């Protein structure tokens, strides 16, 4: 699915560029800042890794020339799925995600030892089951338990929600409702009070952060713009320190755009910079295009 995702997201980015150039409490800006490594100052950097094609260990190979800090603060395993068995939603891992999880000692722990948080992204899978159409609070809470169990079992640092490719209504599933995502995120926060919960700001779920007069916006540690090569302030937490309006696809978004978006991130006081599709090849020259603006430092690659 990785090539399909890349094509669709690149198209969405181009379309976006042409059309536009409390239930909470626990996920505070202070907790968000806990991910920041003390060896560098500036926004945190996030790397989504398409594990169908690439290894998570690549995230740890990039450091700043000035000071030696890791470039990336958060690595996202992309992606597990929310599937449907004809009766209920369930958490599913394809063989590549399962390989990462089965080999956390070599794929995840080395990153965590360097101070990099490792999240599991959850993505729709064309089967109709999604974050926004659980038929009951109990069903949402049951899926939240599956997510929490995965984080605990594999020693991960949290969950990322990406409501794409769900195809609500398939297989007799319901359309998005106002309560589902609210119940899911609220339950997950109760089960994982000290882990990261992040929002890829796309799809029906991201449009439904409030229910019955209460909001889960501040429950997320971070939220980011999903359209690569563009600038758009995402829905989610109110603090700029927890938001990434900038989003780039490594080696696909131009270095000029990456540099410009990084400079704007700093200039406007935002605390997160999102990147997608870090691969196996040495990309330190490209990555330097944004680290020079974010951290006043070029990037070094260490295989």
Image (cartoon, rainbow, N blue to C red):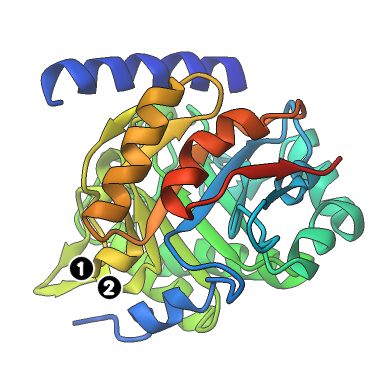
Q: Secondary structure at mark 2?
A: helix
**What is the x, y in percent for residue 229?**
35, 27
Quarter placement of the C terminus = top right
Residue 220 locus on image (x, y percent): 36, 67
In the image, taking residue 56 as reference, residue 257 lies left or right, namely: left
Badge 1 local density, few (<14 within 10 Å), some, or many (20+)? some
Give the labeled residue for mark 2. Answer: 218
- Judged from the image, the secondary structure of the residue bearing numbered disc 1 is loop
| Residue at image coords 49%, 44% | 292
Q: Is residue 93 left or right of residue 273?
A: right
| Residue drawn at point x = 39 percent, y = 34 percent | 259
**Which badge, 1 or 2, comes first in the chain's sequence?**
2
| Nearer to us in this view, 125 or 87 | 125
Q: Residue at x 51, y 53 (%)?
A: 45
Residue 150 lies, with reference to residue 132, above or below; the image says: below
Q: Is residue 45 above or below residue 287?
A: below
Q: Nearer the viewer, residue 102 or 172?
A: 102
Q: Which mark is residue 238?
A: 1
């Amino acid at each position: 699915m990785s090539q399909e995702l890349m094509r669709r997201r690149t198209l969405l980015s181009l379309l976006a560029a042409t059309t536009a150039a409390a239930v909470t409490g626990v996920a505070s800006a202070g907790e968000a800042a806990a991910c920041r490594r003390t060896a560098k100052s500036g926004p945190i950097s996030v790397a989504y890794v398409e594990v169908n094609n690439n290894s998570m260990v690549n995230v740890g190979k990039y450091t700043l020339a000035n000071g030696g800090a890791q470039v990336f603060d958060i690595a996202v395993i992309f992606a597990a799925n929310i599937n449907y068995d004809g009766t209920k939603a369930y958490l599913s891992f394809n063989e590549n995600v399962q390989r990462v999880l089965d080999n956390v000692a070599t794929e995840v722990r080395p990153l965590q030892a360097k101070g990099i948080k490792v999240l599991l992204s959850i993505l729709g899978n064309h089967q109709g089951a999604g974050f926004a159409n659980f038929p009951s609070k109990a069903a949402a809470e049951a899926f939240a338990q599956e997510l929490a169990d995965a984080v605990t079992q594999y020693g991960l640092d949290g969950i990322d929600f990406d409501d794409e490719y769900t195809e609500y209504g398939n297989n007799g599933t319901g359309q998005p409702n106002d309560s589902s995502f609210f119940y899911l995120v609220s339950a997950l926060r109760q089960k994982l009070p000290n882990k990261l919960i992040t929002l890829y700001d796309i799809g029906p779920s991201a449009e439904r952060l409030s229910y019955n007069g209460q909001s889960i916006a501040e429950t997320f540690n971070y939220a980011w713009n999903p359209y690569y090569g563009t600038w758009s302030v995402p829905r989610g937490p109110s603090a700029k320190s927890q938001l990434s309006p900038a989003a780039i696809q490594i080696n696909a978004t131009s270095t000029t755009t990456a540099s410009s978006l990084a400079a704007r991130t700093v200039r406007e006081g935002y605390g997160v910079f999102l990147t997608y599709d870090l691969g196996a090849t040495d990309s330190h020259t490209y990555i330097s295009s944004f680290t020079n603006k974010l951290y006043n430092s070029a990037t070094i690659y260490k295989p």
